[in-house]
Amino acid sequence: MIDRNAFAACACALALLVQAGATAAPALTLVAKIPVPPMTGTWDHLTADQATKRLFLSAQDQQLVYVVDVPGRALVHQISADFDRPQGELYVPQVGRLVVTNGRDGRVRILHGHNYRVAATLTLSLGADMIAFDPRHRVLYVESGGTDSQRGPGWLALIDPVTGELVGKITTGYRAAALVMAHRRARLYVAIPARDQVAVIDTDTRRVVRRFAVPGRPASMALDEAGGRLFVATRTFPGDPRPPTFNVLDVDTGRVVASLASRDATEDMTFDPVHRGIYTTSLDGFVQAYRQVDADHYQLMETLATAPHAGTSQFIPALDELCVAVPPAAGRAAAVWVFRAGP
């Protein structure tokens, strides 16, 4: 005869073991290092063509954009298009264009996505950097300037991604550190470090409609649009003693629903809805993986060391892979480190 109490105890113990095993499973696993030996200096931003799984990397000191075949684990091309410190990048599949901003001359170069020939150029102000694409209105948002960085008034240029024509302008005054575009709603989220806030822009009216206060200077963001949560990482600045944090905001109210410790100098962040993961990369040389328990509860699952200045990254959902740009150092060639998400 089965002892029901003993059976229940065994079942409970088994459940705890399964839960412990699931908790112990790594959120990210390093699976490859793709060497990019010609590259010197430092990387800036990355972007990817999600269909072909090509990764584009800005080599700002070399005035080049490198192209890496991520599944093939190989460097396949170097783009030279009269760049002048290439910084921000965005691949726009809707029009088959690669957009590259240049911090030194303030020019935006729009390239054909397959032959890499220049299709259009436009001059903005110094420090042209972050880019977002609004698929509802088929327009690019490009940030440049910033009174806090001695580059003149900060602003967002609205640009036609095919012709390169300037079709609008939104003044921010200060430098923007990150742009995140919503797709289900007409919203663009703009991190403004100098004001400890995220500005919310209505992309239908092209006006700032909300300002969310952040407990620190926001440096990177990601969006869980289905869950109504905006993730914001802050970082330290000279004269500002506040510690770096990872924060979760309600997109309707701006309320901070969760705040966790973070490594400093976070540069990039991405949300992985399949694994409920939020991955951050830091200039201090760390990848952090947070996990969403539910809309209001989050856990730091692990912190992985990479290398100093390896702050920029790009997630490729079709591969479940996070690509981190690691610059050369101490005799080690530049490389793209590839982390597999799981379980």
Image: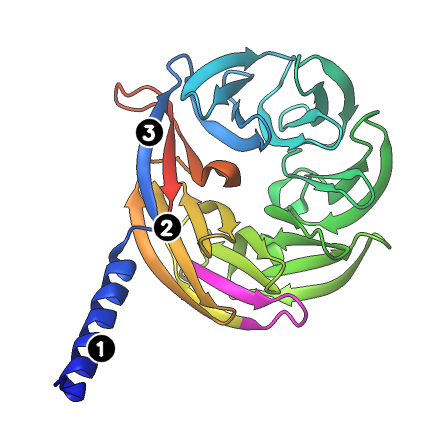
The alpha-carbon separation of the residues under discs 1 and 2 comes to 32 Å
Of the pair 12 and 77, the residue shown nearer to us: 12
Q: Earlier in the sequence, mark 3 or mark 2?
A: 3
The alpha-carbon separation of the residues under discs 3 and 2 comes to 18 Å
Tell me where the magenta segment starts and ends, as one range.
244-256
Of the pair 205 and 74, the residue shown nearer to us: 74
Q: Earlier in the sequence, mark 1 or mark 3?
A: 1
In the rendered view, does 136 fall on the left or right side of 297? right
Point out residue 279 in the picture as x, y percentages from the top left corner. Answer: 44, 49
Q: Which mark is residue 32?
A: 3
In the rendered view, does 210 fall on the left or right side of 285? right
Disc 3 crowd, CA 10 A, few/some/many (<14, 14-19, 20+):
some
Point out residue 317 in the picture as x, y percentages from the top left corner. Answer: 51, 41
In the rendered view, does 149 fall on the left or right side of 219? right
For the N terminus, give its image quadrant: bottom left
Q: Which mark is residue 12?
A: 1
Looking at the image, which residue sits at the far front?
A: 1
Q: Which mark is residue 288?
A: 2
Do the numbered discs 3 and 2 sit on residues whose CB atoms are within 8 Å?
no
Q: Amino acid at mark 2?
A: Gln
In the image, what residue occupies the spot 67% across and 20% down? 113
Q: Amino acid at mark 1?
A: Cys
